[in-house]
Amino acid sequence: MKVGLSSYSLVRLIRDEEMTILDAVDWVAENGGEHMEIVPFGFTLVDHFALADQVKERAAEKGIELSCYSILANLLHEDDAAYEEEVARIKEHVDVANRLGVKLMRHDVTAFRMTPDEMTIHHFNDFLPRIVEGSQRIADYAAQYGITTTIENHGFSVQQSDRVQTVIRAVDRENFRSTLDVGNFLCADEDPLVGVRKNLPLTVNVHFKDFYIRPFYENPGGGAWIRTVNENYLRGAIVGHGDIPIRQVIRLIKDSGYDGYLTIEFEGMEHPFEGSKIGMDNVRRFWNEAPEKESSTQSV
């Protein structure tokens, strides 16, 4: 088990040019992180290979593993030319992941912002063949580098655990699995404990985030609130401070035998340094406090 940070947690500072992605690597190393996920928001690597090489070198110097490379993507294109262009674009990012030396890459399969009609099971079923074909082609391309591509419960249309499982099983590639985000199930109003437990068998990477949760009939007022599929309210919290039962989530993950990367994604209103540091510390502490799974066999 290794605790680390997604560069997305520091995106406000990167976009405001208060720090660079290289500074972010330094910060993670100086604040107890063991690995870092690279999410190219606020900077670009696909057309800036020199920076990709610098990130890889800086991480090696600081003793930080680069765990995953994650990008937005959208395979829900009816137009064939647009669809082919998107598949080709994602493959270019696979090349970047290989250049960074990572063995895990997450790509979305739908746009993040969607209309209510586009979040329905009917829309998902209509576009499932496109999602599956594109994901197969990308996974096959990534296989030459020994990279496992992943789909995250992310983007409203493919956020529920059953839909994630449907895609993974239909793609049917050994190197296509799940990046499991413990908080994102809430965006589709699914209980995180249910979603985590159902998708753990297909998981090769785990994201930790936390949310404050308010029902649709209790408008919480100002702040960085988002609305779920059913119009409930969510606001990013420091991991361990919000309403998700993080300790029980960790118990489920630990009991499953998972021993890979635990990546904090901070999306709260606090300063990113504070939220990211406390989040990493909490996940490590909760993991260490969680009891080991009891043996299912008893001596007689």
Image (cartoon, helix red, strand yellow):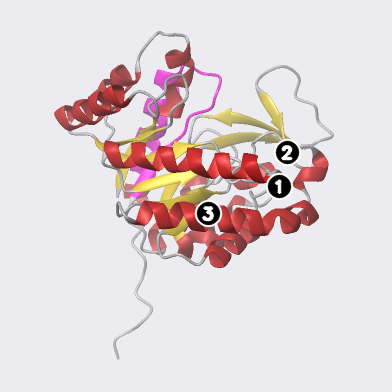
- Give the farthest residue toward the front: 81
Residue at 33% across / 62% down in the picture? 292
Report the Cα–Cα distance between label 2 and label 1: 7 Å
Q: Which residue is painted at 43% across and 51% down in the image?
A: 149
Q: Which mark is residue 23?
A: none
Question: Which x, y percent locates residue 16?
Answer: 47, 9
* Residue linked to disc 1: 189
Which amino acid, mark 1?
Asp
Query: Which of marks 1 and 3 precedes in the sequence?
Result: 3
Q: Quadrant of residue 32?
A: top left
- Tell me if mark 2 has few (under 14), some (14-19) or many (20+) residues whose alpha carbon lies within 10 angstroms of its own: some
Tag 3 residue: 135
**In the figure, 251 relative to 181: above or below?**
below
Kindly check if marks 2 and 1 are in contact, taking CB atoms under 8 A apart as contact. Answer: yes
Q: Which residues are magenta?
A: 261-286
Q: Secondary structure at mark 1?
A: loop
